[in-house]
Image (spheres, rainbow, N blue to C red):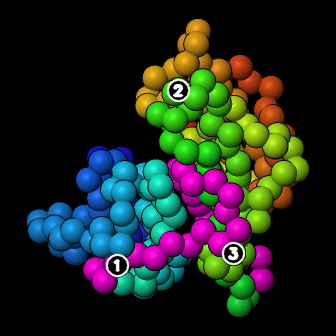
Amino acid sequence: MRNIHIHPDDPSTIYLCLEHGGIVRSFDRGKTWEDVSKGIDYLDIHVIANLPERKDRYYVASARGFFTSDKPEDGWVRAENGLTRDYFHDFLFLPPERDGEQPTMLIATADASPGFWRRENRGARAAMFKSNNGAQSWTRITNGLEDDLDSMIWALVHHPTDHRAIFAGFGNVARGHAAGAGGAGDLMISRDRGDSWQRLDIDLPADRVLWAGAD
C-alpha cells in the first residue's frame, strides 16, 4: 500500500493506492471494497486525491501516467497536456487566490521510473509542473530548479502557517534505497505558490517523506 486517501469532507469514503495492484475504494469506512482501476494500464499507483471541496473529481499519480476521473468506477483518463515527463509522484493543491478560480496544482515528475535510472546510470531528470485549470494543461517551473534534477522530488507539503508557501523534499534514492554513500537529500521552499524555489541551508540525507509543523 502506497497511499491512503480519506475524503476530507466524508470520512466514510476511502481510497487506497496499491503500489503494484491498482486502486480500491470503500464507502463504508473500509468494511467493503471495490476495484476502481479501469483505464490505468500500468497499475503502479503512488498518490490519489480529490479536487478540494469536490466529490466528483479525482486525480491519481502513477509510475507511468497522471490521470483524472469524475467517476472512478467508470474509469480514468490521462491529464498530461504540457507534461514532458512520464513518472509521477507527489502532487498537491493550493487554494485559489480569488473567488471563481480553480485551485492551483503542483506535481513532481521524473524521466521514467527508478529502475530505468539505475540501468542507465543516471539521475531522475526530475521536474516540477504547475496547473491552474484542473490539470487541463501544465507548465514547467524553472525558476530556482535545474533543467534536469538528479534527485527526485519525492514529497510536497504545505507550509503550516503561510498559505502561499510549499516545501519540497528531494532524495537521491531509487526503489526505497539510498544511492551512493547514504544518498543525498535537499529541502527547498517556495514562497510564491510554486513559481520559484530556494534551497534551505539544511543538510539532509535522501528524503522520501516530509511533514511540516508549526514551531
- Mark 3 or 2 closer to N-term? 2
Q: Residues within 10 Å of mark 3 (few under 14, many from 20)?
A: some
Checking the image for residue 118, the label placed there is 2
- Closer to viewer: mark 2 or mark 1: 2
- Mark 3 or 1 closer to N-term? 1
Residue drawn at x 60%, y 24% as measured from the top left: 121
Q: Is residue 17 visible?
A: no
Checking the image for residue 75, the label placed there is 1
Identify the image quadrant of residue 181.
Answer: top right
Residue identified by numbered label 3: 137
Left or right of 69 on screen, residue 135: right
Q: Position of residue 13 (x, y in %)?
A: 29, 72
Residue drawn at x 84%, y 51% as measured from the top left: 142
Residue 124 is a magenta residue: no
Q: Looking at the image, which residue sits at the far left? A: 31
Left or right of 63 on screen, residue 211: right
